[in-house]
Amino acid sequence: MKNKKTQFGFTQVNESEKSKKVESIFNSVSTNYDLMNDFMSLGLHRAWKKYFIETANLRNDAKILDIAGGTADISLAFAKKNKTFSIIHSDINQTMLDEGRKKLIDHGIILPSIVCDCESLPFQDNFFDCVTIGFGLRNMTHKLNAIAEAYRVLTPGGKLLILEFSKVWEPLRKIYDVFSFKVIPVLGDLIAKDRASYQYLVESIRVHPSQEELKKMMEQIGFYDVSYNNLNAGIVSIHKGYKT
Ligand SMILES: C[S@@+](CC[C@H](N)C(=O)[O-])C[C@H]1O[C@@H](n2cnc3c(N)ncnc32)[C@H](O)[C@@H]1O
């Protein structure tokens, strides 16, 4: 078990190494993370997140857990959408969480920000009405464990929403690959002075499960009525499933 291998971008590493490598990437990118998102996605990530929040379709007083919440765009959008929501902003990485916390406070929002590993969540069973994972699942070593933990902490009928890079519509793959492999690492170098982290980003997208594979993973854990929406020809997709 100790020497089991996993993908870190295109490189095979020991499972025990992956979380350290992911941690060091997010320590390195945290201060430029939002700026880079705007450059790399040409601002589209804002629309993707806005739509993601809308698809949650939650009642008043809903309890929401934002996993891999990072710089808090998703927690912030929920907090702005409905003041009655109870939101927990969480991430494994303190530096990302700190950036998120600053942003929340700048917007006059106070809510709990908690450091935790989504593969072992410090919350009771059957508690949240909605769990979100925004651009986080790709970085996790044991994705099924993360999905199972989300399942455990949801109330029966509660929903898991996953926003993640996905498989692009075949006719656009060549041009998307050129943009990904030739432009994004250069932007990372110029803007964040960190080419390697953005090389990891584009590689990690390519080794992430496809829309159908992720749907099957959610069903394997027990989610029902699992569906997904492709945005911008599958550059990202939103998966939704309900706890039985
Ligand atoms: C690309 S950022 C996404 C941040 C934010 N949700 C957004 O959409 O902008 C991915 C986040 O996943 C977090 N992460 C990686 N592995 C994790 C784990 N095992 N548990 C919780 N968070 C994790 C990283 O620390 C990082 O902040």
Image: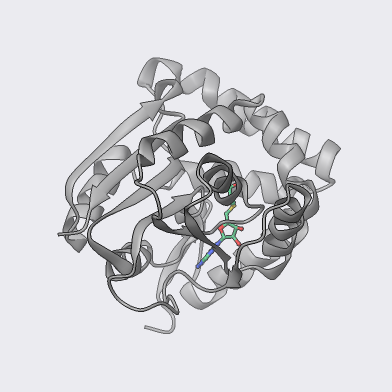
Residue at 49 percent across and 20 percent down: it is: 174
Q: Nearer the viewer, residue 151 or 188?
A: 151
- Image quadrant holding the N terminus, namely bottom left
Q: Which of 38 and 170 is in front in this view?
A: 38
Residue at 36 percent across and 45 percent down: it is: 58
**Which x, y percent locates residue 219?**
18, 53
Q: Which residue lies furthest to the top in this view?
A: 171
**Which x, y percent locates residue 235?**
46, 29
Residue at 29 percent across and 47 percent down: it is: 214
**Which x, y percent locates residue 239?**
32, 42
Q: In this view, does 188 lie to the left or right of 180?
A: right
Q: Is residue 124 above or below residue 201?
A: below
**Which x, y percent locates residue 65?**
45, 61
Q: Which of 142 and 98 is in front in this view?
A: 98
Tally of marks: 0
Q: In this view, does 35 lie above or below 175?
A: below
Q: Is residue 109 above or below residue 176?
A: below
- Image quadrant holding the C terminus, namely bottom left
Q: Nearer the viewer, residue 161 or 13?
A: 161
Colour basis: one colour
Ligand 1 shows up in the quarter that is bottom right
Residue at 62 percent across and 56 percent down: it is: 70
The quarter of the displayed image where residue 80 is located: top right
